[in-house]
DNA sequence: TGAATACTGAACCATATAGTTCACTATCTA
DNA sequence: TAGATAGTGAACTATATGGTTCAGTATTCA
């Protein structure tokens, strides 16, 4: 890899990547209603314990989930940071999309203007 | 792979995955201010044309960017769907996080209650 | 104490991603 | 028409992801 221009926000990298998997979105959805052990999540999502452990680790690294082990069971709950930064990025950029489509009217106006210009210069 | 429980929303898979890369978030940011050719994006993000082409393809597949080739230049602009579904998912689930932390007060209350109970039963 | 439960970690597999180079086509422009 | 420009596509590399199995450790319960 060459040197990278640092636009990176590792936090957003991690959380958007975490959200890009349907199982993990499902886990967040579930934890929003009740805390859960790895085992119960693995059952719900029909997956091995090990597989579920990995998904939870990804969510944890992204700050979306917190876990605590008591005795032999590790309980998973929603994390502290909670989608705030992600919501902020999305909202900020959603405005750009909207602005762009407001601009459509503008473009249409410009096209009309061009046509008029051509007609005038003929 | 075993059979998968269908929680999947391929659209969200694609768009969140697209957003998980800093370069691609940068591209969206840039296109929010001005349309751009592959070449100009490649220069701005210090990357080969081929590399940039791939990023744009990922964004296009996710519906976040539209492109049109006129002559030899392909112009990229923000797409139509524009982060609406993503914003919706995030907002819906952000509420779950908030609810969870409202519940913290509840937990603290319960702990207090337990202490009181212990004190009473001693 | 011994069996069952809950998790953990290493190792493996198939596929995807982020980037490259190189060879090519298509379009401008002088 | 020749050369420069803009993009495309195939092939390659290195690393990550999503899943598995298998062999462990730590806890709980009978």
Image (cartoon, coloured by chain):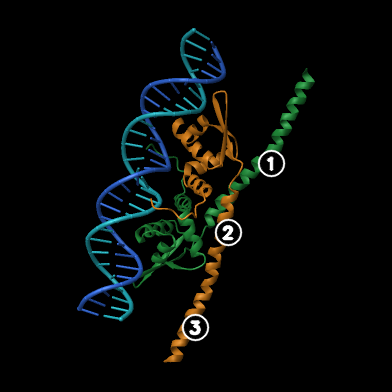
Chain colours: A orange, B green, C cyan, D blue
The local crowd at label 1, few if under 14, some if 14 to 19, many if 20 or more residues have their Cα within 10 Å, is: few
Q: Quadrant of the C terminus of chain B?
A: top right
Residue A46 visible in the snapshot: no
In the image: residue B36, left or right of residue D5: right
A93 over B17 or under it: above or below: below
Above or below, B40 relative to C3: below
Q: Position of residue A22 (x, y in %)?
A: 47, 44
Q: CA distance from mark 1 to mark 2?
A: 26 Å
The residue that label 2 is drawn on is: A92
A5 in relation to A78, above or below: below
Which residue is label 3 attached to? A113
Visible residue check, residue B20? yes
Q: Residues within 10 Å of mark 2 (few under 14, many from 20)?
A: few
Tell which subunit mark 3 falls on: A
Tell me the tag on residue B102.
1
| Labels 3, 2: one chain | yes
Instruction: Mark 1 vs mark 2: tell me if same chain.
Output: no
């Amino acid at each position: 890899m060459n040197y990278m221009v640092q636009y990176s926000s590792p936090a957003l990298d991690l959380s958007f990547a975490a959200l890009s998997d349907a199982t993990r979105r499902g886990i967040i959805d579930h934890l929003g209603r009740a805390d859960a052990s790895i085992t119960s999540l693995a059952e719900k999502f029909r997956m091995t314990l090990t597989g579920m452990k990995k998904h939870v680790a990804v969510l944890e690294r992204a700050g979306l989930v917190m876990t605590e082990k008591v005795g032999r069971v590790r309980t998973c709950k929603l994390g502290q940071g909670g989608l705030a930064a992600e919501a902020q990025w999305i909202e900020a950029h959603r405005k750009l999309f909207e602005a762009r489509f407001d601009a459509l009217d503008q473009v249409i106006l410009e096209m009309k203007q061009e046509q008029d210009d051509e007609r005038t210069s003929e």
